[in-house]
Image (cartoon, helix red, strand yellow):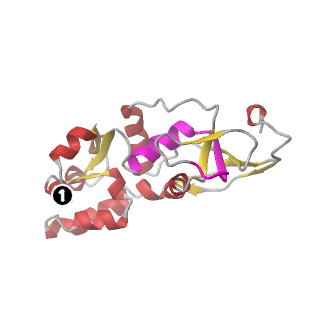
């Protein structure tokens, strides 16, 4: 068994999940995190603070696997499996791909006024209600709020910025770079990745 310690950015792990290359062993429990816990993790990620590590297993393996909750179906043989950390990964995947039941958003107006990211600047609301209130990027910009899935996407973010007052555009870009950079670039350092034989080992009995 070979143990490696690679670093992954949030967006890299999300891309793998979307491509069906990052999955879970079938025996993993279902996703159970509540919105308050998800919001706390997103605040940690936005600040680039440490958010734990993952224990990953290189695929393919000879046991059943499944995708993250609401992620696309897995490829025939996923290249990575999450043994530890699936609650955190799912808690990131759903809001950052806009697939959670809540919309998690940043009050960019309050952040620009304060100049420093605080917990109250990231909030959430049931998506069904949120999309009725904010039917376009222009309406979001008029309210000076932006969903977290748009912050890490350059195309969506800069389209939203065009609807801000000219004097606020550069300030919003600066806040994104200085106060919210972790939303798309946070790394998970020293995520143990196990390279194992398909036939001789079981992930249930791994020890590091």
**For the residue labelled by badge 1, is the local secondary structure a helix, a strand or a loop?**
helix
Query: Residue at coordinates 21% horizontally, 58% vertically from top-left?
Result: 137
Residue in the foreground of this view, choosing between 166 and 161: 161
Q: Give the residue pinned by disc 1.
A: 141
Residue 60, can we see it?
yes
Query: Residue at coordinates 48% horizontally, 48% vertically from top-left?
Result: 49
Query: Residue at coordinates 42% horizontally, 44% vertically from top-left?
Result: 94
In the image, residue 26 lies in the stretch drawn in magenta: no
> Residue 148: x, y in percent?
34, 51
Q: Is residue 116 above or below residue 205?
A: below
Residue 171, can we see it?
no
> Residue 122: x, y in percent?
30, 44
Q: Residue furthest right?
A: 200
- Quarter placement of the C terminus: top right
Q: What residue range appears in magenta? A: 74-96
* Residue neighbourhood size for the residue with mark 1, other residues' Cα within 10 Å, grouped as few (<14), some (14–19), many (≥20): many
């Amino acid at each position: 068994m070979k143990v490696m310690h690679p670093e992954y950015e949030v967006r890299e792990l999300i891309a793998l999940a979307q491509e069906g290359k990052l999955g879970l062993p079938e025996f993993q429990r279902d996703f159970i995190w509540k919105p308050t816990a998800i919001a706390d993790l997103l605040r940690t990620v936005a600040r680039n603070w440490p958010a734990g590590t993952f224990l990953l297993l290189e695929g393919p393996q000879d046991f059943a696997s499944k995708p993250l909750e609401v992620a696309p179906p897995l490829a025939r043989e996923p290249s990575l499996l999450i043994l530890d950390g699936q609650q955190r990964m799912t808690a990131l995947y759903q809001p950052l791909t806009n697939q959670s039941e809540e919309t998690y958003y940043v009050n960019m107006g309050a952040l620009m006024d304060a100049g420093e990211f605080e917990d109250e600047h990231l909030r959430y609301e049931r998506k069904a209600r949120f999309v009725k209130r904010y039917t376009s990027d222009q309406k979001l910009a008029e309210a000076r709020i932006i969903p977290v899935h748009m912050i890490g996407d350059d195309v969506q973010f800069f389209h939203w910025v065009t609807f801000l007052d000219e004097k606020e555009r550069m300030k919003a870009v600066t806040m994104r770079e200085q106060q919210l950079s972790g939303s798309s670039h946070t790394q998970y350092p020293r995520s143990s990745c196990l390279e194992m034989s398909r036939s001789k080992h079981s992930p249930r009995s791994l020890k590091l």
